[in-house]
């Protein structure tokens, strides 16, 4: 049986000082998730988060010819009570959530093999062997969407991986 934890994941936000940017954590944000499957997609967090316009967009200029607020596409994550949980860091600042604070969904597979040898004569032998990976054809969840500013739902899992494979061997010894 093969069991592994998920890979470290970073919640991505608008570019700040480092690579893709990390958000500011301003509310109760769980660091562990558990995959729960609905009808079509899975959910990584125990609650459904919604997105609103980032509060920093309120400070963007609106007056005169340059109405720039309409170009502010930053989003913030709110919980079921409407409390902001994650928001984009201020320009030029590092987000307080940090890099790789989450681990993706783990995976498990059961592998097996079977082998049988037959003596065909005093000096010869025939061996038949079958190897199987992922015997139960168990699907494993892909990584959730953890991009704060994407249009998709935060924490939603839309992919599954894993399939059964068989390999057979026939060996004749003389």
Image (tube, rainbow, N blue to C red):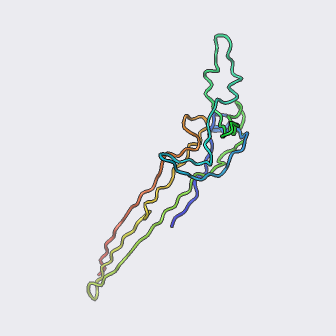
> Is 75 on the left-hand or right-hand side of 26?
left
**Number of numbered discs on residues:** 0
Q: Among all residues in the image, which is located at the extreme bottom?
A: 122
Instruction: Return the residue nearer the eye: 127 or 62.
Output: 62
Q: Nearer the viewer, residue 4 or 45?
A: 45
At a point 52% along the width and 64% down the height, the residue shown is 2
When the figure is inspected, residue 81 is found, relative to residue 55, above or below; the finding is: below
Q: Is residue 101 above or below residue 62?
A: below
- Taking 33 as reference, is 142 left or right? left
- Residue 117: x and y in percent read 34, 80
Give residue 73's position: percent from left, percent from top: 61, 27
Q: Which quarter of the figure has residue 130? A: bottom left
Q: Residue furthest top?
A: 64
Residue at the spot x=35%, y=78% of the render?
Answer: 116
- Quadrant containing the C terminus is bottom left
> Up-down: is 20 above or below 129?
above
16, 46: nearer the viewer: 46
Which residue, as the protein is rendered here, is positioned at the far left? 121
Location of residue 50 (image quadrant):
top right
Is residue 112 left or right of 120 when viewed as pictured?
right
Q: Residue at x 58, y 44 (%)?
A: 155
Q: Residue at x 58, y 51 (%)?
A: 104
Residue 37 position, x and y percent, is: 52, 50
Does residue 17 sit above or below 138 in this rendering? above
Q: Where residue 3 appears, x then y in whole percent?
A: 54, 63
């Amino acid at each position: 049986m093969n069991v592994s934890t998920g890979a470290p994941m970073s919640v991505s936000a608008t570019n700040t000082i480092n690579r893709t940017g990390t958000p500011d954590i301003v509310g109760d944000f769980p660091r562990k998730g558990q995959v729960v499957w609905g009808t079509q997609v899975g959910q990584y967090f125990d609650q459904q988060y919604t997105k609103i316009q980032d509060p920093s967009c309120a400070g963007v200029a609106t007056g005169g010819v340059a109405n720039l607020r309409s170009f502010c596409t930053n989003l913030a994550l709110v919980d079921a009570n409407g409390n902001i949980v994650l928001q984009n860091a201020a320009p030029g600042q590092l987000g307080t959530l940090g890099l790789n604070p989450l681990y993706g969904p783990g995976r498990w597979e059961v592998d097996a093999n079977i082998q049988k040898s037959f003596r065909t004569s005093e000096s010869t032998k025939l061996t038949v062997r079958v190897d199987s990976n992922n015997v139960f054809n168990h699907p494993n969840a892909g990584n959730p969407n953890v991009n704060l500013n994407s249009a998709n739902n935060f924490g939603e899992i839309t992919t599954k991986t894993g399939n059964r494979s068989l390999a057979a061997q026939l060996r004749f010894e003389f």
